[in-house]
Image (tube, rainbow, N blue to C red):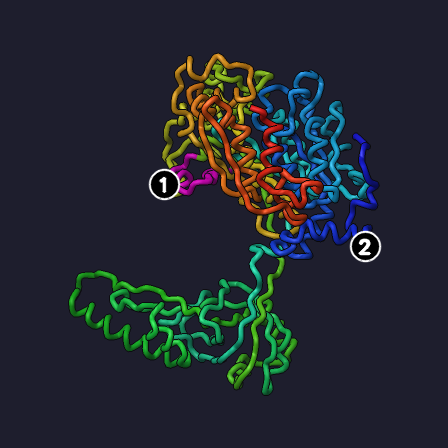
Amino acid sequence: MSTEQGVTWGEWMGAHKTGAAIDHESERIDRQKAAFGHDTIARLKDLNVLIVGCAGVGVETAKNLILSNVGGVVLWDGSICEEVHRGSNFYVTPEHVESGDVTLAEASLGELRSLNPFCRVDILDKTDALGDDVVLSKDVLGTRRPYAAIVVTKFLPKKELFHLNESARANGIAFIMAISNGVTSSIFSDFGPHHEITDATGEPTQTLAVSNVEVLDEKPTLLKVEGVEDGEKVVIVTVAQNEHGLEDGDVAVLDDMREGMEGLNGKSVTVKRVAIASPTAAKVDTRGVTFKTALALPTTAVISNYERQYDFYKAAFDEEQGDSGKKFPVRTITIFNRLALVLNDDNGKKLLEESNIASIDIFGQYQSGGLLNQVRPPIAKQYRSLAESLEKTPVPQMLRGEDWELGKGVDVHLSILAALNFHEKAGHWPRLHNTDDASELVKVAEEISNRHKSVEGSCWSQTIQYGFPTGDARDLDEKRIARYSRLFPTELSGFCAFLGGAAAQEVIKASGKFTPIDQWVHHDEGALVVDECKSNFGPLFGSRYDHQIAIMGKDFQAQLANQRVFLVGCGALGCEYLKGLALMGVGTGKDGKIWVTDMDRIEVSNLSRQFLFRQNDVGHPKSVRGALVVKRWNPS
């Protein structure tokens, strides 16, 4: 492992810095503290991340994590820099390519280190294998901490990839896989057999003022509370806010309860939403003044009003329909200023026991005051391994909902598993524009699908309707799978940027903040392949744009080169757009040009999001410094 570093480890970690150093790091991440909160920011400093692969997705992931101020990032990629890598890895230079012995990890290291002096960045030696002695190190980068996450951004041999995933799972290391192949991109997230989420949404918790508490001896039929049967006793709390913003199963702590109810203060209670059944024909306007005014009445009065309404419309319906057998149409209206307290679960039993309350009737003593403070108890989740999820994901998620509903993710999923099996059998990955490899990959995918067909809950080629498997066999989408094979070695800068952001966000979830994605999400953008005439996408020139040309053609590249683009803004998004335009070759032709404008000057707090800038750029115009950087990347 490289040891070159400008400062010692003690100066890198926030806990060891004093005086101006603390203020400087704090100023850099000021916006992040507002988004993540102080606790999460502190936990991020404990995260060491191993990134496998330093092509487009890998360098984008590393860049985003370093800017997020994690504790340390280690890179591994022994691939030698080629000219085509300059189309997605913005840190690869002509000198790296001409050298002939510089790896992608080595080419990326210097610039990545310069992004954030408070995040330690290093590389594994190119001769190091990803064995357990490396991956399970207990002292990464001298922090005396292990890896918290591994991000795989390139395909590895099947056996090696599965072993890496199992090692991570067995040692509490988050495993993320983000890969881009042609017009297909996929991300996989595995936080192991046990992961605790401390804040599932990142939204601020609610504090609700209680305006009334009622005990209903028998729940009326029209009143709907999940888990409460008609005739059962139920406690209904009315809050002063128009909308409480809570969900079924949320937990709140009682506070400021008075007049004989002080023993309830500090006790946790589970809450459920309250709804009421109303005839559809009544057309109740829940946003109208009449509805909101009615909700100011006691719950018993509200129910009484809706019972009269229900009876009126039901009688009219019965008279009109007679014995037709038609069902009386009813809608359920959620009453957003009321909650039901759940007193028969563990929280409720504990509340009654610790408060020495024999009956819930004590809530009927309510006179005034009271608060409900929402709390978020930790959520324990478990995830399947990479091997299991590749087999037993019958309807893989797609980024576009309509693609998921139609089951298009099945063919992408089978393509990934087929590629791993193809490599295991052939000893190489599918080659660019190779029709023999494409035919073989389709054959392997079909074999996998047929084998999975007899396995309950597995991924195979079956008809999907509205996101649900029907069990009816369908033909594989051979065109989609063959295209996946032909474009397998390529990656587009836009997909790399998207996956790099998504993968970095998944790593941050290792802190317990936010809910990880449900294992797999795929995207396939076949619309980008518009002209597959052989003379249009080949032969290639050996240029930095070869991957783009291999997918979208020479004609498209020529049109890009002569585009004239005026970019307004060079902040966090503007830097990304400017990078993307430069990597794609926009404005490089004789008639093309890019203009960028931004009235702002660079501030220290910008450095954690706007990756084109460094400390010595502070005070200078964003547009001027941003343009200088990307012109170095692509002088054309």
Disc with the residue nearer the chain's start (1 vs 2): 2
Say what amino acid the circle numbered 2 marks: Gly
Q: Would residue 144 appear left or right of 30 to someone viewing this image? A: right
Say what amino acid the circle numbered 1 marks: Gln
Q: Residue at x 77, y 52 (%)?
A: 22
Point out residue 367 in the picture as x, y percentages from the top left corner.
52, 86
Magenta extent: 393-408
Q: Residues within 10 Å of mark 1 (few under 14, many from 20)?
A: few
Point out residue 401 in the picture as x, y percentages from the top left corner.
42, 43
Q: Residue at x 80, y 40 (%)?
A: 139
The answer to whether residue 347 is magenta is no
Q: Is residue 362 above or below residue 383?
A: below
Q: Which residue is denoted by mark 2 in the rendering?
A: 19
Q: Which residue is denoted by mark 1 in the rendering?
A: 465
Q: Is residue 355 visible in this depiction of the protein?
A: yes
Q: Is residue 364 above or below residue 529?
A: below
Q: Would residue 623 appear left or right of 49 to someone viewing this image? A: left
The answer to whether residue 404 is magenta is yes
Q: Secondary structure at mark 1?
A: strand
The residue closer to the viewer here, 598 or 227, is: 598
Q: Is residue 483 above or below residue 467?
A: above
Quarter assignment of residue 52: top right
Q: Residue at x 36, y 77 (%)?
A: 294
Quarter assignment of residue 85: top right
For the C terminus, which image quadrant? top right
The residue closer to the viewer here, 618 or 538, is: 618
Q: Would residue 158 appear left or right of 537 to someone viewing this image? A: right
Separation (CA) of disc 1 from disc 2:
61 Å
Point out residue 482 in the picture as x, y percentages from the top left corner.
44, 21
Point out residue 55 in the picture as x, y percentages from the top left corner.
61, 28
**Label drawn at residue 233:** none
Q: Residue at x 55, y 67 (%)?
A: 206
